[in-house]
C-alpha cells in the first residue's frame, strides 16, 4: 500500500511539474510576441511605409499590442435586422457574368459573407468555419439555400473568386452543390452600398509593403430571407450548425431573428516581423495557458480525491482487521 502511494505521488509530481512548465512556456511566448509587436522597427527599404501604417492604426509610441487602436473605432458590425438589401446592385460572379443580387433571392434564404479573397488570415478562417458548420447541416446549398460570398476589395477579379469557389466546394465535399455557392466581386460604389445596408464597417490599411492592400474589418455572416431582408447575424469565425439550421429554417419563413452579442473578431494587425497577426496569436497562446491551468487544477483535484478515498478505505479495512483479530 505504501509503495503504491509513493508511485501515485511520484506520477502526480511529474504531471504537475510538466503542466506548470507548459503554462509558463505559453505565457512567456505570448508576452514575447506582444513585446515584439509593440517595440519592433523596420529599417529595411521594403518597410519604409510601415511608420505610416502605425500612425494610421492609431498606435502611439510605447502603446502595447493589447491596446485597441483608434482605427478600430471605425470598424465593426451594426446589426441591421429586417433591413432590405439593395437587390438591384450588380456584381460579377465567379464565371465572369454581371448579375443583380436579385438573381439569388425570391425562392430560398441565403447566407451572406463579406470578405476579401487575399485576406492574410481572418477571412479564410471565417469561410472555413462556415464550411465546417454546413457539413453538419441537413439543408443543401443550391436546393434549400444559397451561399453568397462578396469581396469588399474592388481590385479583386473573377479568377480569384473562381479559385476560392473551387477550394470551398472541394472542402465541403459535395461537388454537386456548386450551383449553390456564389463568389462575387464588384465595383467600389456597389460594395459601399451593400456594406452600408448590412452594417459592415471596415477601413483600408497598408500591408507589409506599405501599400493599401489590406482591410481592417470584423468577422460575421448574415442570414437573409428569400425576400432579401437581413434576418440574423452570427459573429466570429466558428458557427454552431444548430444555430445555422435554425436561422435558415426561420429565414425561409421570412422570420426575423434577435440581435446577438456583439463580440467581434477583428482582422487588422499585420506584424511583418512574424508574418502573422501578433495580437490574435498572443491571445490564442494566452488562452491555451489558461486552459492548461484549468486542466492541471482538475487533475490535481481528482488525484487528491482518489488518494483520500483510497487512504480512508485502507484505514477502514485496517480497523476492521484489528477488531476481527481481537475477537479471535
Image: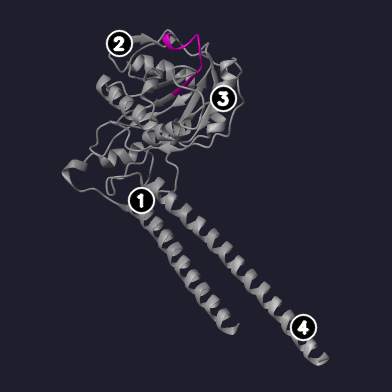
* Labels 4 and 2: the sequence-earlier one: 2
Mark seen at residue 38: 1
Q: What residue is drawn where x is 30% and y is 11%?
A: 97
Quadrant assignment for the N terminus: bottom right
> CA–CA distance between discs 3 and 4?
63 Å
| The image quarter in which residue 167 lies | top left
Quadrant assignment for the C terminus: bottom right
Image coords of residue 124 (percent x, y): 36, 34
| The image quarter in which residue 4 lies | bottom right
Residue nearest the observer in this picture, 213 or 92? 92
Specify start and end residues of the magenta stretch as a single range: 103-112
**Which type of secondary structure does the marked residue at label 3 adopt?**
helix
Q: Which residue is mark 4?
A: 320
Q: Which residue is mark 2?
A: 97
* Labels 2 and 1: the sequence-earlier one: 1
Is 297 left, or right, of 282 in this rendering? Answer: right
| The image quarter in which residue 207 lies | top left
* Labels 4 and 1: the sequence-earlier one: 1
Amino acid at each position: 500500500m505504501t509503495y503504491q502511494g509513493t508511485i501515485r505521488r511520484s506520477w502526480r509530481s511529474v504531471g504537475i511539474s510538466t503542466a506548470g512548465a507548459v503554462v509558463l512556456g505559453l505565457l512567456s511566448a505570448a508576452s514575447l510576441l506582444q513585446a515584439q509587436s509593440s517595440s519592433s522597427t523596420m529599417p529595411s527599404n521594403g518597410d519604409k511605409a510601415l511608420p505610416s501604417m502605425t500612425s494610421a492604426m492609431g498606435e502611439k509610441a510605447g502603446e502595447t499590442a493589447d491596446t485597441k487602436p483608434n482605427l478600430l473605432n471605425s470598424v465593426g458590425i451594426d446589426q441591421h435586422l429586417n433591413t432590405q438589401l439593395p437587390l438591384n446592385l450588380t456584381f460579377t460572379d465567379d464565371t465572369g457574368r454581371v448579375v443583380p443580387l436579385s438573381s439569388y433571392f425570391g425562392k430560398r434564404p441565403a447566407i451572406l459573407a463579406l470578405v476579401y479573397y487575399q485576406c492574410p488570415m481572418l477571412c479564410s478562417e471565417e469561410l472555413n468555419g462556415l464550411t465546417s458548420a454546413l457539413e453538419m447541416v441537413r439543408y443543401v446549398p443550391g436546393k434549400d439555400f444559397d451561399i453568397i460570398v462578396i469581396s469588399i476589395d474592388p481590385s479583386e477579379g473573377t479568377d480569384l473568386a473562381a479559385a476560392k469557389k473551387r477550394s470551398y466546394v472541394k472542402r465541403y465535399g459535395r461537388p454537386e452543390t456548386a450551383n449553390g455557392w456564389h463568389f462575387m466581386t464588384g465595383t467600389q460604389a456597389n460594395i459601399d452600398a451593400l456594406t452600408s445596408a448590412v452594417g459592415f464597417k471596415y477601413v483600408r490599411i497598408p500591408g507589409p509593403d506599405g501599400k493599401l492592400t489590406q482591410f481592417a474589418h470584423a468577422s460575421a455572416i448574415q442570414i437573409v430571407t428569400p425576400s432579401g431582408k437581413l434576418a440574423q447575424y452570427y459573429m466570429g469565425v466558428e458557427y454552431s450548425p444548430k444555430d445555422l439550421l435554425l436561422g435558415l429554417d426561420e429565414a425561409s419563413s421570412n422570420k426575423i431573428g434577435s440581435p446577438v452579442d456583439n463580440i467581434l473578431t477583428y482582422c487588422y494587425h499585420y506584424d511583418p516581423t512574424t508574418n502573422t497577426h501578433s495580437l490574435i496569436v498572443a491571445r490564442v497562446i494566452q488562452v491555451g495557458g489558461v486552459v492548461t491551468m484549468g486542466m492541471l487544477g482538475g487533475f490535481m483535484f481528482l488525484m487528491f480525491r482518489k488518494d483520500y478515498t483510497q487512504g480512508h478505505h485502507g484505514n477502514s479495512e485496517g480497523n476492521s482487521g484489528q477488531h476481527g483479530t481481537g475477537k479471535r
